[in-house]
Image: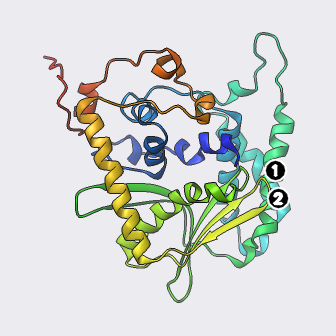
Amino acid sequence: MDVTDLAADPADQRTTAADTTPRRPSLSPSRAADFKTCPLLYRFRTIDRLPERKSRAAVRGTLVHAVLEQLYDLPPAERTVAAARELVEPAWAQLREEAGVAELFEPADGEPAAESLESWLASAGTLVETYFRLEDPTRIQPHGREELVEVTLPDGLLLRGYVDRLDVARNGALRVVDYKTGGMPREAFEAKALFQMKFYALVLWRTRGVVAAQLKLIYLKDGDVLTYAPDEAELLRFERTLQAIWAAIGKAVETGDFRPNRSRLCSWCDHQAFCPSFGGTPPPFPAEAAAAAGWRTTLPVEVVG
C-alpha cells in the first residue's frame, strides 16, 4: 500500500458553498477513518481545524480527479487519451490558483525543487493515460460525478461524502467508482480501502433503497482494479460500526479527551509539534467552537458579551 495515498485523500480538498454553511456535525468516510487511525488527529482536523500543508501527492490526486471528471463532459466518441491529456493543462491552471499550491514548486532556500513542474505534470498525465487501460469511457455514461451524497440515520447521525462517479444501469443497478492515484493495497489492507466505499454504499442504500451491485476502486499508479459486492446484512453491520465510531467521537468531544495513536502514518502528520507522542502539547480544547458547531460538551464555554 502507498502510505502517502492514505495520508492525502483528494476528497478532503473539495470545498463547496454547502461546506462553508453552518450545519450540525456530520460524519464523512475520511473523518471516520481519521478517528479510527488517531482520535487526536480527528480533533485537530475537525474541531481545532488546524492548518495543514498541501503536498504534491495530494494536489496531483486532485488534478487527476478533475481531469477524469471533465473527461465525461465530452461526447462519448471524443473521450480519447489525447483529449484527456489536453485537459491536464487547463485543469492545472485552475488548481494552481488555490492557496498554497503554486508554492509547492518554488525553490526552498535557494535549492532547486526535487521534481520540476514539467515532470510533475507529466506524471499526472501518465496516471490519466493509465485510466484508459482500465475502462473504456466511450461506453460509460455516468449518472453522477463528484456527487455529494448524504443521509440522516434514524438515530440522528448525519452521513455525508463525495462519490467520484456513480453509474446506474438500465435495470437500476448501482456501481460506485472511486479513483485512487496511489497503488493497490496488499490483501491485508483491502478492508481499510473498502471502508470508504461501504460508507457510500450505505448512504445510497438508505437514500435509494438499492444495495450497490459493485464497489469499484481504480488504482492508477499500477493499473489495478479492486471490486466488491456488498450485501444488505453487511451494510447493516457497517452502519452499526459507524454509529459506534460516532458515539466514541461524541464522548471524546464531551470530555475533550482525544488520545493520540502512534503509527507509521505519523511521519506524514503536520501536527507532531502538538502531539504528546512526540513531546508536544495540544492547544486548549476549543469548547466554544465545538459548542457553536453543534457539539455537546461538558467543558466550560466562555460566554462573550
Identify which residue is drawn at 67% across, 76% down: 140
Residue 61 visible in the displayed image: yes
Quarter of the image for residue 227 reads bottom right
Identify which residue is drawn at 36% across, 71% down: 207
Task: State if disc 2 and disc 1 touch (CB < 8 Å).
Answer: yes
The residue tagged with tag 1: helix, strand or loop?
helix
Most distant residue in the bottom direction? 171
Q: CA distance from mark 1 to mark 2?
A: 6 Å
Residue type of the residue flagged with mark 1: Gly
Residue 139 pos. (x, y %): 72, 79
Task: Say left or right for 155 vs 72.
Answer: left
Residue type of the residue flagged with mark 2: Glu
Identify which residue is drawn at 76% across, 21% down: 106
Relative height, residue 95 to residue 280 (above, below): below
Relative height, residue 146 to residue 230 (above, below): above
Quarter of the image for residue 105 reads top right
Relative height, residue 99 to residue 139 (above, below): above
Mark 1 surroundings: few (<14), some (14-19) or many (≥20) residues within 10 A: many
Task: Say which mark, if any, is on residue 125.
Answer: 1
The residue tagged with tag 2: helix, strand or loop?
helix
Most distant residue in the front direction? 188
